[in-house]
């Protein structure tokens, strides 16, 4: 089901551009340490944006099972790395996802794969949160879904405002999570030590 995301033509074009970028930054692009750098950066960027070539709903549908469990399912502490679309610098952290099935469940790993898919695109944290929510809602039609994302943004740490300790939290929900009690149950469980 994994798609081929690596594209030779794109790779060659990216290499040309990254070589020009290095030269513009005042580097000697022929020095030994940099000779393969345009190739490496191009490959890394293709990996970090591989989410464009993936279909997140298909990920959930590929392991969708009929099941009568109708209580909260939580997958918490899903590590992710993404790139902010403003500076193309990393933001990274954890996503926590809960849903209440309505006849169908999905493979637990698929929830993490959906987070991977959306994080491997140029993003803002708010949109990523919303896209994960919508994808699960549309693919599984659950009684409700809630997503919380906690992240550190390198564009706020390495440059700009240079705040090393600020963490951004975003959250979004549908259906049953409109009830404060249901949201509380989820938030209590994700912030509790486990295992
Ligand atoms: N809402 C939101 N903002 C983000 C995210 N990632 C980066 N940003 C912000 O995007 C904004 C871009 O603002 P601009 O003023 O256009 O860019 P800038 O001059 O580089 O801004 P500074 O970072 O303040 O130096 C900055 O405030 C960043 O902190 C994100 O995921 N969500
Ligand atoms: Zn940024």
Image: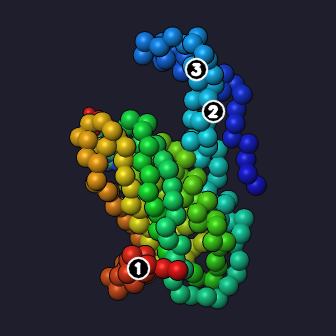
State which tag comes first along the sequence, 3 or 2. 3
Q: Is residue 15 above or below residue 98?
A: above
Which residue is at the far right? Answer: 1
Q: Residues within 10 Å of mark 1 (few under 14, many from 20)?
A: few
Please provide percent x and percent y for residue 162.
26, 41
Left or right: 188, with 161 as reference point: right
Foreground label between 3 and 2? 3
Left or right: 156, with 57 as reference point: left
Residue 33's label in the rendered image is 3
Task: Give the SS element for disc 3.
Answer: helix
Foreground label between 2 and 1? 1
- Structure colour scheme: rainbow
Label 1 to label 3: alpha-carbon separation: 46 Å
User: Can residue 174 be seen in the rendering of this structure?
Assistant: no
Task: Give the SS element for disc 2.
Answer: helix
- Total residue callouts: 3
Residue 192's label in the rendered image is 1
Label 2 to label 1: alpha-carbon separation: 39 Å
Which residue is at the far front? Answer: 32
Q: Quadrant of ligand 1?
A: top left
Residue drawn at point x = 47 percent, y = 63 percent: 95
State which tag comes first along the sequence, 1 or 3. 3
Q: Is residue 166 above or below residue 188?
A: above
In front of the other: 116 or 69: 116
Residue 35's label in the rendered image is none
The N terminus sits in image quarter: bottom right
Task: Give the SS element for disc 1.
Answer: loop
């Amino acid at each position: 089901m994994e798609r081929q995301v690596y594209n030779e033509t794109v790779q060659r074009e990216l290499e040309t551009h990254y070589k020009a970028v290095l030269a513009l930054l005042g580097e000697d692009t022929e020095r030994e340490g940099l000779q393969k750098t345009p190739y490496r950066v191009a490959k890394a960027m293709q990996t970090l944006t591989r989410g464009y070539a993936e279909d997140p709903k298909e990920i959930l549908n590929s392991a969708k099972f009929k099941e009568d469990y109708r209580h909260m399912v939580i997958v918490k502490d899903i590590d992710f790395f993404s790139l902010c679309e403003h500076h193309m610098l990393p933001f990274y952290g954890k996503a926590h996802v809960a849903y209440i099935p309505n006849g169908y469940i999905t493979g637990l790993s698929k929830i993490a794969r959906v987070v991977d898919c959306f994080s491997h695109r140029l993003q803002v944290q708010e949109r990523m949160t919303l896209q994960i929510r919508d994808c699960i809602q549309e693919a599984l039609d659950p009684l409700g879904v809630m997503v919380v994302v906690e992240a550190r943004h390198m564009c706020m740490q390495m440059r700009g405002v240079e705040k090393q300790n600020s963490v951004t939290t975003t959250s979004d929900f549908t259906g049953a999570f409109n009830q404060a009690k249901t949201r509380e149950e989820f938030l209590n469980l994700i912030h509790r030590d486990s295992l």
